[in-house]
Image (cartoon, rainbow, N blue to C red):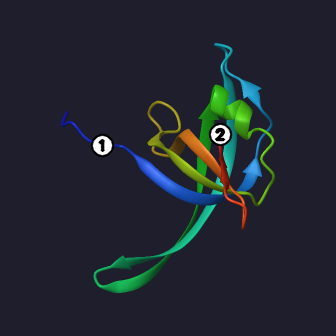
Amino acid sequence: MLPGVNRVLLTAAVVELQPLRYTPAGVAALELLLEHESEVQEAGQARLARFQAKAIALGDIAHLLADTPLGAQLKLEGFIAAARKGSSRLVLHIQKAERLFPGSGSAVV
């Protein structure tokens, strides 16, 4: 296997937030559905990038994001992995999160 980089930086709005749960190992887990929209350059042309993506936060980050209101904007950092072993569905695993508040800065969680 070749060494590689799996790092995602994304700003997105929270459109679904599942209740905080715990894994069988007792780790807090929070599943979210995110929506992103931006304009990017591709082959010299502007392109609208709009999509929804599933994400999960574990441990302390799950606790800190559990009260995030729907529609809140987040600046996220994490990595992409299969939803479960053998699955082709991908999920963003959140490692760092920052809530973005219009006109008043941000708060790191």
Asked if labels 2 and 1 touch by Cβ distance under 8 angstroms, the answer is no
At numbered mark 1, what does the secondary structure look like: helix, strand or loop? Answer: loop
Q: At 72% from the left edge and 61% from the top edge, which residue is drawn?
A: 104
Q: Quadrant of residue 101?
A: bottom right
To which residue does mark 2 refer?
Answer: 109
Q: CA distance from mark 1 to mark 2?
A: 24 Å
To which residue does mark 1 refer?
Answer: 5
x then y, percent, for residue 18? 77, 41
Which residue type does callout 2 highlight?
Val
- In the picture, which quadrant includes the C terminus? top right
Return the residue nearer the eye: 23 or 108: 108
x then y, percent, for residue 12? 61, 59
Q: At 36% from the left edge and 43% from the top edge, which residue is drawn?
A: 6
Q: Is residue 5 left or right of residue 79?
A: left
Q: Is residue 26 left or right of residue 84?
A: right
Q: At 62% from the left edge and 48% from the top edge, which residue is drawn?
A: 98
x then y, percent, for residue 66? 77, 38
80 in relation to 39, above or below = above
At numbered mark 2, what does the secondary structure look like: helix, strand or loop? Answer: loop
Q: At 68% from the left edge and 46% from the top edge, which residue is drawn?
A: 32
Density class for disc 2 (Cα within 10 Å; few <14, some 14-19, many ≥20) is some
